[in-house]
Image (cartoon, rainbow, N blue to C red):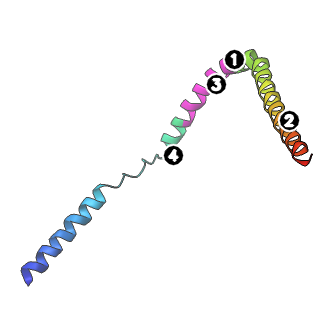
């Protein structure tokens, strides 16, 4: 009986260790100085990319707006066509 209990206890310990090993480690924590360093490096990167991204946005803005308008117009025209087909179907059924 004692051997059985010790085997069960050992199996429980092994199972709990395996379950704990399968969990992901917590994300690393940064102290105050490390957060300041990361923040300043991020800001430098963003500041250097901002003029490039702004110029790309300005360059492509009109074409992106036109593509969006065209897409919305196409969607609405298809919606109107479906509506007209439904109306035509209702009128032919009533006659």
Q: Which residue is mark 1?
A: 56
Asked where in the image residue 79 lies, by quadrant, the reply is top right
Q: Nearer the viewer, residue 68 or 3?
A: 68
Q: Which percent across, then down, holds residue 58?
A: 76, 18
How far apart marks 2 and 4 lie (CA) works out to 59 Å
Q: Which percent across, then down, holds residue 12?
A: 21, 70
Q: Nearer the viewer, residue 38 or 54?
A: 54
Q: Which residue is mark 4?
A: 32
Sequence-wise, which precedes: disc 1 or disc 4?
A: 4
Q: Which residue is mark 3?
A: 47
Q: Which residue is mark 2?
A: 80
Q: Nearer the viewer, residue 45 or 68?
A: 68
Q: Residues within 10 Å of mark 3 (few under 14, many from 20)?
A: few
Q: Is residue 61 magenta?
A: no
How far apart marks 3 and 4 lie (CA) works out to 22 Å
Residue at 52% x, 41% y is 35
How far apart marks 1 and 2 lie (CA) works out to 36 Å
Mark number, residue 29:
none
Residues at marks 2 and 4 touching, judged by CB atoms closer than 8 Å: no
Asked where in the image residue 66 lies, by quadrant, the reply is top right
Residue at 79% x, 18% y is 62
Sequence-wise, which precedes: disc 3 or disc 4?
A: 4
Whether 70 is drawn above or below 80: the answer is: above
How far apart marks 3 and 2 lie (CA) works out to 47 Å
Choose mark 2 or mark 4, whichever is in front.
2
How far apart marks 1 and 4 lie (CA) works out to 35 Å
Left or right of 43, for residue 23: left
Sequence-wise, which precedes: disc 1 or disc 2?
A: 1
Q: Which residues are magenta?
A: 39-53
SS assignment at label 3 = helix
């Amino acid at each position: 009986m004692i051997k059985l209990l010790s085997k069960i206890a050992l199996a429980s310990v092994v199972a709990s260790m395996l379950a704990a090993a399968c969990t992901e480690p917590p994300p690393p924590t940064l102290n105050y100085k490390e957060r300041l360093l990361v923040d300043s490096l991020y800001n430098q990167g963003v500041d250097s990319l901002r003029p490039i991204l702004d110029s790309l946005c300005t360059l492509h803005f009109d074409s992106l707006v036109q593509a969006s308008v065209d897409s919305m117009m196409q969607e609405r025209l298809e919606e109107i066509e479906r509506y007209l087909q439904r109306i035509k179907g209702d009128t032919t059924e009533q006659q």
